Image (cartoon, rainbow, N blue to C red):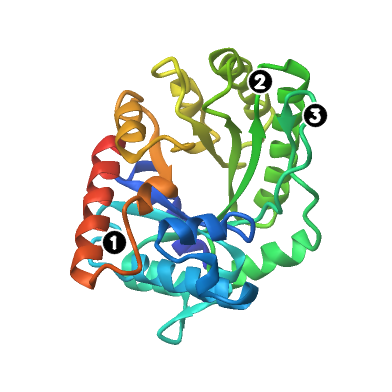
């Protein structure tokens, strides 16, 4: 299901103007055991990585195929690489998302975080990036997501984070995809508001260096100051600014997001809150539908 230019531009318009949010279904190897525990699957219930990834794939498939998981409220979904290469009922997951659900598929491409330095954690190197981006295009992926983390208002560290994000973003744009740049700020940082002010200025400066047609998205922690990132959302090179839940509960994340005029959600843990493997399908679909509706309403 390789991407064609007409479909790509249709997806750009859907992402730029559509009502809804982005579902983050991209927990990686390190965060999968925690996600499974929250889903009611303990580590003694599976043996080894293959079994673990099979469990998380079954969970993601259950979410994707739920009645409320459609483009009516969900604009896009971010996939882990294994999920991109996986199938649901014999069909590649990205094709199920776009062709059957009308949902735009993204791919998480970062390989985790470096140790903290200057108050931040940069991304680790991404070996085989060019090949991965080509595979993503061949699977019909629209864009990528890449996360790094800011722990304190350290200008040198934040400058390095934003520089790395935009350098990687340019590689993604050159490959014909839309990057979601994600310099997350830790919600527990004692200097969260100060870090946000620095981050906004550094991002704005980098956006002004982009050429016409070099389009990016931003995934940012919900800011302390309401509307702080509105001017970034209005930048001609920005398709959309989305918010991460960052450890807030679903209710608190939605309450904070509802005060941001130009951000929509891209929630992971908040989307799956309260879902367990042990639920009947009707219980699961009702709980997921409730979460989807809350996040959708907060994103309007």
Residue beneath the point at 53% across and 68% down: 140
Q: Is residue 77 above or below residue 192?
A: below
Alpha-carbon span between mark 2 and mark 1: 38 Å
Q: Position of residue 30 (x, y in %)?
A: 64, 56
Camera sees residue 25: yes
Q: Is residue 234 above or below residue 274?
A: above
Mark 1 or 3: in front is 3
Q: Residue furthest front?
A: 44
Quick one: label 3, few (<14), some, or many (20+) residues within 10 Å?
few
Quadrant (top left, top right, bottom left, bottom right) of the C terminus: top left
Q: Earlier in the sequence, mark 3 or mark 2?
A: 3
Mark 2 or 1: in front is 2
In the rendered structure, find residue 117 and report the number of the disc placed on it. 3
Q: Classify residue 263 as left or right of residue 173.
A: left
Q: Classify residue 128 as left or right of residue 57.
A: right
In the rendered structure, find residue 152 and report the number of the disc placed on it. 2
Residue beneath the point at 64% across and 75% down: 48
Q: Which residue is mark 1?
A: 70
**Camera-side residue of 155 and 27:** 27
Quick one: label 1, few (<14), some, or many (20+) residues within 10 Å?
many
Residue beneath the point at 54% across and 37% down: 218
Q: Position of residue 18 (x, y in %)?
A: 32, 46
């Amino acid at each position: 299901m390789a991407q064609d230019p007409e479909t790509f531009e249709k997806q750009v318009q859907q992402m730029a103007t559509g009502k809804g949010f982005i579902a983050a279904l991209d927990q990686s190897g390190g965060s999968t055991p925690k996600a499974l525990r929250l889903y009611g699957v303990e580590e003694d219930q599976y043996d080894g990585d293959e079994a673990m990834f099979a469990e998380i794939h079954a969970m993601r498939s259950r979410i994707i195929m739920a009645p409320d998981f459609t483009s009516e409220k969900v604009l896009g979904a971010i996939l882990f690489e294994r999920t991109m290469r996986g199938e649901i009922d014999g069909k590649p997951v990205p094709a199920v998302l776009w062709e059957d659900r009308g949902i735009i598929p993204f791919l998480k491409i970062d390989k985790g975080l470096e140790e903290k330095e200057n108050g931040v954690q940069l991304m680790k190197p991404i070996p085989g990036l060019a090949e991965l981006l080509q595979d993503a295009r061949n699977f019909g992926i629209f864009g990528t997501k890449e996360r790094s983390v800011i722990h304190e208002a350290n200008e040198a560290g934040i400058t390095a984070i934003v520089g790395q994000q935009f350098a990687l973003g340019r590689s993604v744009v050159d490959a014909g995809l839309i990057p979601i740049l994600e310099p997350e700020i830790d919600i527990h940082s004692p200097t969260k508001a100060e870090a946000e002010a620095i981050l906004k200025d550094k991002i704005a400066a980098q956006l002004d260096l982009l050429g016409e047609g070099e389009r990016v998205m931003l995934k940012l922690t919900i800011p302390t100051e309401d509307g702080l990132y509105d001017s970034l959302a209005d930048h001609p090179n920005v398709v959309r600014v989305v918010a991460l839940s960052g450890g807030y509960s679903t209710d608190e994340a939605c309450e904070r997001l509802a005060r941001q005029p130009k951000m929509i959600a891209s929630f992971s843990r908040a989307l799956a809150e309260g879902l367990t493997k042990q639920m009947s399908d009707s219980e699961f679909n009702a709980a997921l539908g409730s979460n989807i509706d809350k996040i959708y309403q907060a994103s309007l």
